[in-house]
Amino acid sequence: MSYGNFESEFREHIGVELTSPLEIGEVYYLSFWVSAAEGRSSPPDTPGWAQPVFWASNNVGLLFTMQPNIWTGFTGPEFEPRNYAHLFAQEVIADTSDWILVSGSFTADSAYRYLAVGNFFENAMTDTMHLTPGNSSGAFVYVDEVCVSTSPNGCDIGNGLIELHGNAPAVVFPNPALNAVTLLRNSVTAAGWKVTDLMGRCAANGTWQGGNVELDIGGWASGTYCVYLDIEYHDCVRLIVVR
C-alpha cells in the first residue's frame, strides 16, 4: 500500500536484509519497476475490508536503513514517515497496464544493512490521483526487479533466460531495455541471429561474427521479444523486454 486513505496514514512496506552492508563513500546505482495495482484491497467476502482500489500515488521508492523495522498486524511500520527516500518516483504511478522504470544513484553515507520498498512520505507530501469514482481504502502498487548495484549497468537479473543450448553462451543486456540493447558472445564462431516478437514477426536479424551486436530499439513497440542464435545447429533463446 503506497497511500492509505486513513487519518493514521497507514502504509505497507516490504524489505530485505542486504547480502552485505553498503560501503560508506561507494556510489550505488538503484532501479526498480513499478505499476499501479487495480482491484480490491482484500477478498470480496471480507467484511468491511473489500473496498475497491481506485487511488494512485507517487513517492514509491527505496529506503536503506540500519534496522529491519519488522512489524506484524495492522499497526504499520513502527517508524514514522521520514519524508525521505534514497530513490523514489516523483510522478504519480497511475498506469495499470504497463511498468514504469524508476532509477538513480546515491553515495552511501552509512553502512546500511537493510532495504525497504514503499512510500516513506506522509500524506501531506504525497500526490494522489483518484483513478475512477468510488470509495477506496488507498493506493496499491506492484514492484519488480529491484536492483542495487555498484555498476552503472545495473543488475544481471536474468529474467530473460528461456533456454540455452550448446557451449556458446550469450548475454543480452540491459534487460529490460529502453532504447538500446547489446548482444554479447565470447565465441568468435560466426552465427546467425534474429529477434522476433511473440507472434514470430522478425524485428531485426543479421550474422554474428563475434564480439558485440548493438541494437537500436528506440522505435520498437513495448513488449517481449526473443533472440534466436543459430550456433552449430542449436538455438540459444533469450528474452528482451522492451519498456
Image: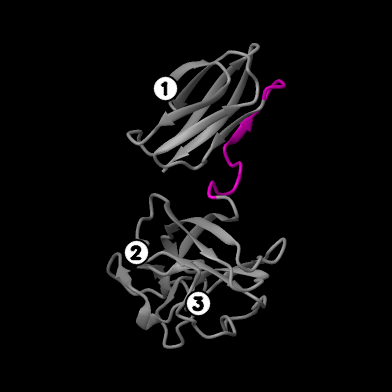
> Could you say whether the residue bearing mark 3 is in a helix, strand or loop?
loop
Compare residues 48 and 78 and report the one nearer the observer: 78
Q: Is residue 161 above or below residue 52?
A: above
Residue under the image location 64 percent in, 78 percent down: 69
Reading the image, the residue beneath label 1 is 204
In the rendered structure, which segment of residues is drawn in magenta? 152-168
Of all residues, the one furthest to the left in this rendering is: 133
Classify residue 92 as left or right of residue 45: left
> Could you say whether the residue bearing mark 1 is in a helix, strand or loop?
strand
User: Which amino acid does the dot numbered 3 rest on?
Assistant: Arg
Labels 2 and 3 touching (C-beta < 8 A): no
Which one is earlier in the sequence, the residue at label 2 or at label 3? 3
Q: Is residue 170 above or below residue 51?
A: above
Label 1 to label 3: alpha-carbon separation = 45 Å
Q: Is residue 159 above or below residue 88?
A: above
Compare residues 6 and 18 and report the one nearer the observer: 18
Image x and y of residue 185, in percent: 61, 26
User: Which amino acid does the dot numbered 1 rest on?
Assistant: Ala
Classify residue 234 as left or right of residue 133: right
Image x and y of residue 141, in percent: 46, 62
Label 2 to label 3: alpha-carbon separation = 18 Å
| Residue 106 lies within the magenta run | no
Residue under the image location 52 percent in, 86 percent down: 80
